[in-house]
Amino acid sequence: MRGVPLKVIQELMGHATLEMTMRYAHLSPETKERAVQQIDAPASQHRAALA
């Protein structure tokens, strides 16, 4: 929820699978909504948000 990719967390925690990491992730509804908004945004807006 702080912007760290789950794959990175998986590796740092030593989880063998992403499924194990997801058990502990407990993503909030707000985090999911922000992810959907980023996916739906035009590419130009996404690049501007990363800058």
Image (cartoon, rainbow, N blue to C red):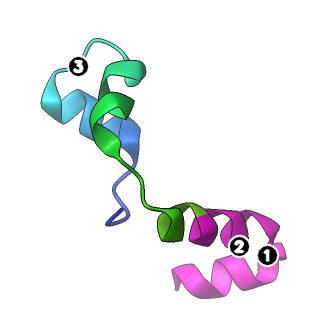
Residue toward you, 26 or 18:
26
Q: Residue at x 84, y 76 (%)?
A: 42
Amino acid carrying label 1: it is: Ala
Q: Could you tell which of marks 3 and 1 lies nearer the N-terminus?
A: 3
The residue beneath circle 3 is: 15
The residue beneath circle 2 is: 37
Amino acid carrying label 3: it is: His
Considering only vertical position in the picture, is 35 above or below 21?
A: below
Report whether 48 appears left or right of 18: right
Instruction: Using a 10 Å C-alpha cutoff, classify the residue at mark 2 as few (fewer than 14 neighbours), some (14 to 19) or many (20 or more).
Output: few
Query: Could you say which quadrant of the image residue 14 lies in?
Result: top left
Q: Residue at x 26, y 40 (%)?
A: 9
- Tag 2 secondary structure: helix
Amino acid carrying label 2: it is: Gln
> What quarter of the picture does the N terminus occupy?
bottom left
> Which residues fall within the magenta stretch?
33-51
Considering only vertical position in the picture, is 47 above or below 27?
A: below
- Camera-near label (1 vs 2) is 2
- Tag 1 secondary structure: loop
**Residue 41: numbered disc:** 1
In percent of width and height, residue 17 lies at: 36, 15
Farthest residue in the left direction?
13
Q: Could you tell which of marks 3 and 2 lies nearer the N-terminus?
A: 3
